[in-house]
Image (cartoon, rainbow, N blue to C red):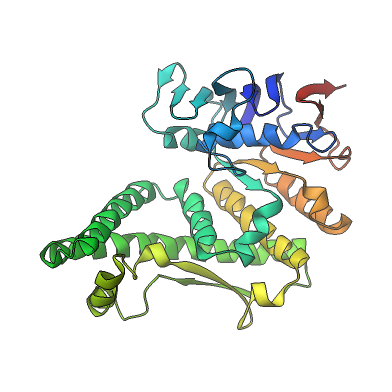
Amino acid sequence: MLIKSLKIENLRNLETVDITPHPRFNVLYGGNGAGKTSVLESILVLSRGRSFRTTQASELIGRSGKYFRVFAETINDDRKVSRLGLERSSRHWRGRVDGNDLTQLSQLTRILPLVLMEPNSHLLVSGAPEVRRKYLDWGMFHVEHQFLDTYRRFSKILKQRNAALRKRQENVLDSIDEVFCQLGESLDGLRKEHCISVSAQVLVLLKHLSPTMQGFKLEYHPGWTKSSLRKSLVDGRERDLARGATGAGPHRADLFLLFGDTPARNLLSRGEQKILSAALLLSQASILNQKGERPVILLDDLASEFDEQHFENVLVHSQEMGGQVWVTGIQHCKTATEHALFHVEHGRVQEMV
């Protein structure tokens, strides 16, 4: 997958941007606050409908109106060209593909797969379980076709169960729990299978990114401790009723990142946590490659996150994925011989020849 053209209107300080990126490697450079990260943010928003910097769409809207727009022309590995567009206000959104209105933002995500590495990516290692669940679920979205339907159905039954718990409707819980267990175990099975692929790829990537970081293993914990989800729900019902929330299930799952038997967040330095996070994120790109789909890779402020050698390693392996890479930084990036170089200043983006 690559982006052939990108247009941005009224997103943060980017009033009007219209660029033609290089098919393999693109460098955005300029001073702090110039708008480099906002360019990558616009690509992520077009793909996923949300930003990695804020949960509020209103914070993305610039000074020139009540909404922002992002447009792109993309081409996939089968040479299929798609024209994508997203308009968002503080309350509403409108998405289009090839002139047709969309009903779900996930339709954009399906067309424009991407992997993002940014300064907070180390939270994959040191952050809450929710961060790792989201990482795992985004990774499955493109490679497990039944995942999205299973995830949505489970999320719906979880809300119904929590509502029944708050109302203390135990007769309703009996019927809900059967469906809850079926969907929960299906979601759990998909995650376990995907974790095997992730673990294998991370081990390979760590050998290249940081050969000294050996002994890594990944363990998936499903979100319950009993012999089955059904038993966990039965044994925990009184506690769930008291709390008004479901305590066991895949919504409590986590990835345990270990070196030997020690949690990575307790053993690794901040720099090493960033390297492990890079390996986790690039593993998603590797898995997509194996499925015949190369994602766009976005690397925000990479040079400030790593020393020179690890920066070079991450950059080289990102390019070896064969897809389109976008990098931001204060200085020029001289690693790639064939690339497009864009100078960003005060929200204006200009290609340098």
**Image quadrant occupied by the N terminus:** top right
Q: Residue at x 74, y 51 (%)?
A: 317
Q: Residue at x 79, y 26 (%)?
A: 346
- Asked if residue 1 can be seen in this view, the reply is no
**Image quadrant occupied by the C terminus:** top right
> Residue 337: percent from the left, percent from the top?
86, 36
Residue placed most toward the observer, 57 or 338: 57
Q: Residue furthest bottom?
A: 261
Would residue 350 appear left or right of 144 to someone viewing this image? right
> Residue 245: percent from the left, percent from the top?
31, 65
Q: Quadrant of residue 188?
A: bottom left
Residue placed most toward the observer, 148 or 38: 38
> Residue 191: percent from the left, percent from the top?
43, 61
- Asked if residue 122 can be seen in this view, the reply is yes
> How many badges with numbers are in the image?
0
> Residue 123: percent from the left, percent from the top?
63, 60
Q: Residue at x 65, y 67 (%)?
A: 203
Q: Quadrant of residue 71?
A: top right
Q: Residue at x 31, y 81 (%)?
A: 227
Residue placed most toward the observer, 217 or 243: 243
Residue placed most toward the observer, 132 or 66: 66
Q: Residue furthest left?
A: 171
Would residue 289 appear left or right of 169 to someone viewing this image? right
Q: Quadrant of residue 54?
A: top right
